[in-house]
Image (cartoon, rainbow, N blue to C red):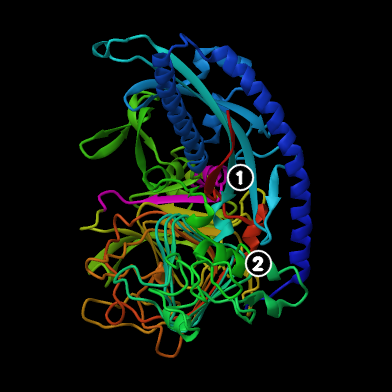
Amino acid sequence: MITRNRQHNRSNQTGSSRDRGSILVLSLVILVAVAGFTMALVTVAVSTESTASTNTRKLTAQNLAEGAVEIGAQWVQTQWANQEANAIEAAAVDSPSELTNESNWIATTVAGYAARYAVLRIAPNLSPTPTPISPVQLTPDGFGWYVDGNDGVRSFYYLYAIYGYAEFTPKISEGDSKSVSATVSKVVEARVTPLFQYAVFYNSDLEILPGPNMTLTGRVHSNRDMYLGSGNTLKMDTDYVRAVGRMYRKRKNDNTVTAGTVLIKNLANMADADPSNDFKFKLPNGFVTDSKMYSKSEMASLGITTAQGFDSTFGGWDYNSNGTFNDLRDWKTWGVQAMSFWGGTVQTSDMDVPKAEPPSQDLAIDPFVPKAGGDYDLVGGTYVQVASGTGSYSKGYYHNKAGVQLRDGVIYASTGANLSACLLAGTVSTTTIWDAREGKNVPQTVIDVGKLRLSLLQTGLTGAAATALSSLKNSWNGLIYATQSGASASAPKGILLKNGSELPDNPITGAKSGLTVATNLPIYIQGDYNTKVNGISSATNDPAFRKPAAVIGDAVNLLSNAWANTKTSSSGLPGASDTTFNTAMIAGNTDSNPSSTAYSGGLENLPRFHEDWTSGNKKAIIAGSFVNLWKSKIATGTWTYGSPKYTAPNRIWDFDPNYKSYSKLPPFTPLAVSMKNVCMQ
């Protein structure tokens, strides 16, 4: 299923060479900018006295100002992650001379002291008009401030100078109440990457512990720790395996060491013409072997005793016991040896992997979020629209952006127009599913995607139906937000998508820009999803026969083509059939709990199953991106294997290579934003 294109790798390496040239230009920009910052420091900073006590106060003021800088950098990162780059544009200045105007600073507090920060834009110049559904809302200028990774993933880079100002006044009781102020600044680089350009992205611990063989292509990233193992072989066919924390060859839930083979691509060997070398590396004794993250038993077979195998806990191995790790056969400590083995593919906190900030759950998928000056108030448990700017709540990001909004079974345009009159019968309906993992009957709002697509294609309507269809077409932007009021963990509700083998096209332009469905509830997909273009499918699941697609919710559940909704609390497991789901997904999950040994289910169960897939070795084919950003609030049932919950499918999962092209990303793809310190003044 996974094909290789060596020419593609070479072209990416050429792109990287261009990037190195851009970095030289970038360095000059930074040097010029820092010179400007120094002048600004002279202008803005306030100096009082040059006594010994003043120096102590100055140091305190400087520490407070540095704290303000860090708050400012975090603010920039969070704004990008929550798709609010316009807020940065509104706050940023273009010249250090503008910093003399206090209105260009943002007030904050550091350790109980008043402080402020300011943002100076360095590069690139951003477009003032965001593209409505662009994954990167503000695009770079003609200089092309982006890089192509070896894997073809593109990240946009934005440079800012963050200034911090603080004034420190000692307490009168200390005998000296003279104030001292300080201003510091640093240059930061914000790296903005569409989330679905990662094959796997976890904002928390990532556990990958499949029983059968499993192959992952595309970037694999965890903002915390990574736990790896396999019942057979886990093959990571990617040059990007990163954890902001540590990597372990053990289980998180019970701390037992993991078995099986974990095979990871060696980035250093990708430049040659022989793909068979991609999964080889050289041991310290000179032997060339498979590029494995060795388990405890595999290390023992080499004569090396370890606690868990070769992972972040590995402290090195002194072959000749001479007290150093500098001899030919010595194994260095984890960080150094991992870089030697995989050439940079595997990186952890030892290599200072930066956190990639994603959007927050509350702001992204909740229907309403607290906001001073919003358009809604909460009255008797119901959100009521009030005069603009007078409320305490606003719509969450996806609710606000959606061209089509489904609330409590009624479908609306973004303008608020009721669209029911133009929809084919059965486009929106209700049902109930027995969810054995939750142990509850879950009421569902059903969206028949096929009927919605046909509704958009209607002609000849008159009256109210014609008016509603016009509203539907004009508000269509490829994003549907769906919710039901009153859902909770004790009384869950969900959204079901069915008949989605072909997704709607833009009804006005005909563009095959795809569909994103977002909800604060668990989302269920029944049957083949996004497998046709113009009514034609591919027997090999060719990427050309897909449209951009994403589902975003509290949890993601997959039901096969054989699902007939006959499952009950006492019926046992219905049989599944081979089914294909071509979609990116952002799903919540439950955490592994070491105190109770409860397992989250790992990546292999991020999409939840409800049928007997094992009998007959039924295939669940997925091409997309697997993203976990939050804990489930509604679907909080713990993972358990076997009847009556589910039995595992033959997982044929792959990263969708279409997502490497911005034009083929799902509508309103969220962002992951990492920050890098360039220099500090």
> Residue 215, percent across and down?
54, 76
Indicate whether residue 472 is drawn in magenta.
yes
Indicate whether residue 198 is drawn in magenta.
no
| Magenta-tinted stretch | 465-487
Which mark is first along the chain, 2 or 1?
1
Residue 418 appears in the picture as rendered: no
Kind of residue sitting beneath label 2: Leu
Q: Which residue is mark 2?
A: 267
Residue visible at 63% across and 76% down in the picture: 282
Residue visible at 62% across and 59% down in the picture: 659
> Residue 9, percent across and down?
74, 65
- Is residue 524 shown above or below 680? below
Q: Which residue is mark 1?
A: 134
Between the residue at mark 1 and the residue at mark 2, the CA separation in whole angstroms equals 31 Å
- Is residue 340 shown above or below 301? above
Judge by depth and name the residue closer to the eye, 381 or 93.
Answer: 93
Which corner quadrant holds the N terminus? bottom right
Crowd rating for badge 2 (residues with CA inside 10 Å; few <14, some 14–19, many 20+): many
Dividing the picture into quarters, in which one does residue 129 lie? top right
- SS at circle 1: loop
> Residue 568, percent across and down?
25, 76
Which corner quadrant holds the C terminus? top right
- Is residue 362 shown above or below 251? above
Q: Nearer the viewer, mark 1 or mark 2?
A: 2
Residue visible at 61% across and 45% down in the picture: 134
Judge by depth and name the residue closer to the eye, 198 or 483.
Answer: 198
Kind of residue sitting beneath label 1: Ser
In the visual, does 383 lie left or right of 620? left
Residue 509 appears in the picture as rendered: yes
> Residue 302, percent across and down?
50, 83
**Residue found at the far front of this picture:** 322
